[in-house]
Image (cartoon, rainbow, N blue to C red):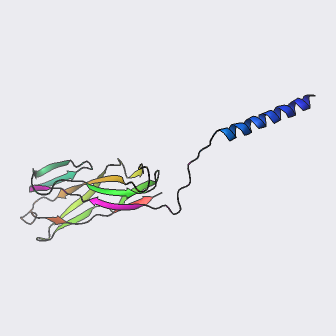
């Protein structure tokens, strides 16, 4: 009798579990496409605007949110090109983990005088160099704003003024 009751109980439990799993929808995160595709487009360049440097040098910083600050013997000028952080549009599936790598400091060159100034990339709108994409799909960009600091050398003997050009490289690595 007890065996019969146990079988009946097992049968009822099994049917109850079967009914539960057939009524409720169970969801899981789908596997990402293989290979994972990430595309990065430059939408806006990093621009420090106009400023003048005294003989002691200093730093000019543009943060990821387009704010310029100076220290040392630097004076901001409010004309010319507007100050702006670089903007990169990252296209990837939602939830993709991306790490941003830089190659260290970069040198910007004054093509007229040959003078050099150092650029350090050090400000990211993602808060850090690793982030998870949040756009609802892979056709909508994840905007990443990037700022940096120019180090103006002291004792400029008249060769420092001018327009500087250069490139910096960021590597966006998906995980």
Report the residue that reaches farthest toward the front. 23
Q: Residue at x 86, y 34 (%)?
A: 7
Task: Tell me where the magenta segment starts and ends, as one range.
Answer: 29-53
Give the quarter of the image for residue 85: bottom left
Quadrant housing residue 9 = top right
Q: Quadrant of the N terminus?
A: top right
Pinpoint residue 5: horizontal percent, then vertical percent: 88, 29
Relative placement, left or right, of 101 versus 27 is: left
Q: Residue at x 39, y 54 (%)?
A: 140
Left-right relation of 22 to 61: right
* Viewer-proximal residue among 42 and 73: 42
Return the x and y of residue 62 as percentages of the image width and height: 22, 51
Q: Position of residue 8 (x, y in %)?
A: 85, 32
Which of 118/50 is in front?
Answer: 50
Is residue 48 within the magenta segment? yes
Q: Note whether 130 is above or below 17 in the view shown.
A: below
**Residue for point 32% across, 49% down:** 125
Q: Is residue 101 above or below residue 26?
A: below
Seen as rendered, the residue at the extreme left is 158
Q: Nearer the viewer, residue 157 or 113?
A: 113
Left or right: residue 30 versus residue 55 is right
Please tell me whether residue 11 belongs to the stretch shown in magenta: no
């Amino acid at each position: 009798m007890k065996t019969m009751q146990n079988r009946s109980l097992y049968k009822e439990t099994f049917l109850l579990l079967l009914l539960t799993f057939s009524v409720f929808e169970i969801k899981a995160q789908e596997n990402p496409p293989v290979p994972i595709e990430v595309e990065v487009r430059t939408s806006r360049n990093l621009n420090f605007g106009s400023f003048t440097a005294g003989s002691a040098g200093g730093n000019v910083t543009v943060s990821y949110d387009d704010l310029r600050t100076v220290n040392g013997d630097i004076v901001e000028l409010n004309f010319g090109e507007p100050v702006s952080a670089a903007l990169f549009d990252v296209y990837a599936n939602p939830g993709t983990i991306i790490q941003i790598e830089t190659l260290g400091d970069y040198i910007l060159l004054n093509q007229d005088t040959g003078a050099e100034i150092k650029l350090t990339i050090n400000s990211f709108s993602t808060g850090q160099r690793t982030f998870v994409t949040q756009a609802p799909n892979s056709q909508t960009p994840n905007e990443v704003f990037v700022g940096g600091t120019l180090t103006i050398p002291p004792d400029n003997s008249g060769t420092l003024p001018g327009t500087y050009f250069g490139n910096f490289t960021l590597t966006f690595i998906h995980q």
